[in-house]
Image (cartoon, rainbow, N blue to C red):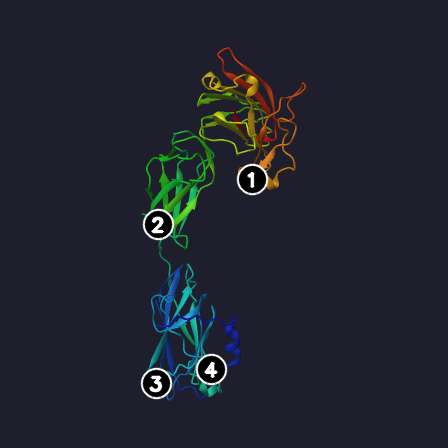
Amino acid sequence: MKRFAIAVPLIAFAVAAVSIPSGTAGSTNKKFTAASAPNPAPGGGVVNFTLTISNDPTSPNQLGSANVAPPFPMSATACSGATTDPSATCDPLPSGSSVSSSLLQLRNLGIAPGASRTFTWQGTTPCADPGNLKWVVYAKQSNEFNGPPGNNFSPYPLDVAQAVVTAAGPLATLAFLQQPTNRQFDQQPIAPPVTVRGTDLCGNPIAGASVGLTIDPATGTSGATLGGTIPASTDSSGIATFADLTVSDVGIDYRLVATSGSVSATSAPFDIVDQLVTCSSGSCPPTSSSKAATTTTVNASGTQNGDILSLSLLTGTSPPSGFCGADFAALGAESAFEVESTGTSTPSYEVTWRLDKSIVNAQPENGASHFDICLGSKRVTQTSCASAPADGFTIKGGSKAVCDPGSGLYWGLLPDKKGGGSCKAPAVLSRNKNQAGDVVITFCVPYPWDPRVFGG
């Protein structure tokens, strides 16, 4: 067996039809037939068709050439003979033949009266049968598809009807129908339940498919796991429902990956948080959370009725290396907080970060003045460093924060606020030790900055 690929410029079938008139005297005794298989063919898929051209036993001459126009787009290769896998096994077409996605030109066929030849051509069938699909075949006595009209085999052309049957095929696509909503509580079932729909190439639902879920390892908190009933099977509507899905750890920008065999889909990002509170017009209730000997309390203003303030404390994380100075070492837990707005809110934050004395006393320099806040932030309209303003907020020492392409945030140590009045830029309002020996730093992050915070 030889493998081959013949590529020719696309030839409009109408040219052949115009150049050779139909219904010509002298060709009525030269008869032929043609057949396609499978017929009907499955809809919405890639199908290997066999085309058989037969010279009638009563014909006085050989059938030397043919042009075949398909009913739908075909591959740019075709094979002599019948083969189940043209990409692996393909006998060459007769010499002088050529093929494009819209025309198969067969030359030097040499089909004697009563004989036939079969060819394999791969095509992509439509999802629905419009009712007018057909192969259009022109045949001639000459080997080069030329000569006077008396060379024509009848009928000229021959129409071979092709049917397509639409039925649910193999699973081809997965899509998240109900995405994980953006704010979810730590280790609580995600609500509303996540759903994933499986369909074939034509969009028909696939029932009984097993769909698994995992966390995209490049997102959220490293080592976090999913709980609940996994995998889930698709119902008659092709929908798999994960009614009790949980995530083990608080984290930012998780994504789920649904899989079934080799088919997969990725969800929209979502957060797993420690605290959620509903805001009123003007402000949100003070919101606190404690973890890893760290307590963060957030007050938000500039909100509207129905806004949601979320607070997450993340362990085992650190700011990008070098962006907060060589001497900064993150202590306790990272704090991430955000107002999800229902309208045109302009949220500003006043935050109190408290580090337990057990960690404070373990530091060689443990006076309050030796502790700083490293802020990672971007303007709420930013999507990346490339879309960021040319300069970030002012950092400790008077220079500007630098944008980290990895996180898309500006990072830097917060300076002390100077002068009275409200905060115009992120700054530390106060830092001290309380009576228990904890270090307490209060700082502000005014609108439009969207913060993540480390202390150390």
CB under 8 Å between discs 3 and 4: no
Query: From the viewer's perspective, is the residue at label 4 or at label 2 nearer?
Result: 2
Viewport quadrant of the N terminus: bottom left
Query: From the viewer's perspective, is the residue at label 1 or at label 3 nearer?
Result: 1
Where is residue 220? Give x, y as percent: 45, 35
The disc, 3 or 2, on the residue closer to the chain's N-terminal end is 3
Which kind of residue does numbered mark 4 sit on? Phe
On residue 145, which mark appears?
A: 4
Can residue 306 be seen here? no
Q: CA distance from mark 3 to mark 4?
A: 18 Å
Q: Residue furthest front?
A: 364
Which kind of residue does numbered mark 1 sit on? Pro
Where is residue 19? Give x, y as percent: 53, 80
Query: According to the image, label 1 marks what residue?
Result: 405
Which kind of residue does numbered mark 3 sit on? Pro
Secondary structure found at label 1: loop
Q: Could you say which is closer to the camera, residue 414 or residue 343?
A: 414
Check disc 4: other Cα within 10 Å, few if <14, some if 14-19, many if 20+. Answer: many
Q: CA distance from mark 3 to mark 2?
A: 50 Å
Q: Could you say which is closer to the camera, residue 184 or residue 290?
A: 290
- Compared to residue 100, the image places residue 349 above or below, namely above
The disc, 1 or 2, on the residue closer to the chain's N-terminal end is 2
On residue 261, which mark appears?
A: 2
CB under 8 Å between discs 4 and 2: no
Q: CA distance from mark 1 to mark 3?
A: 73 Å
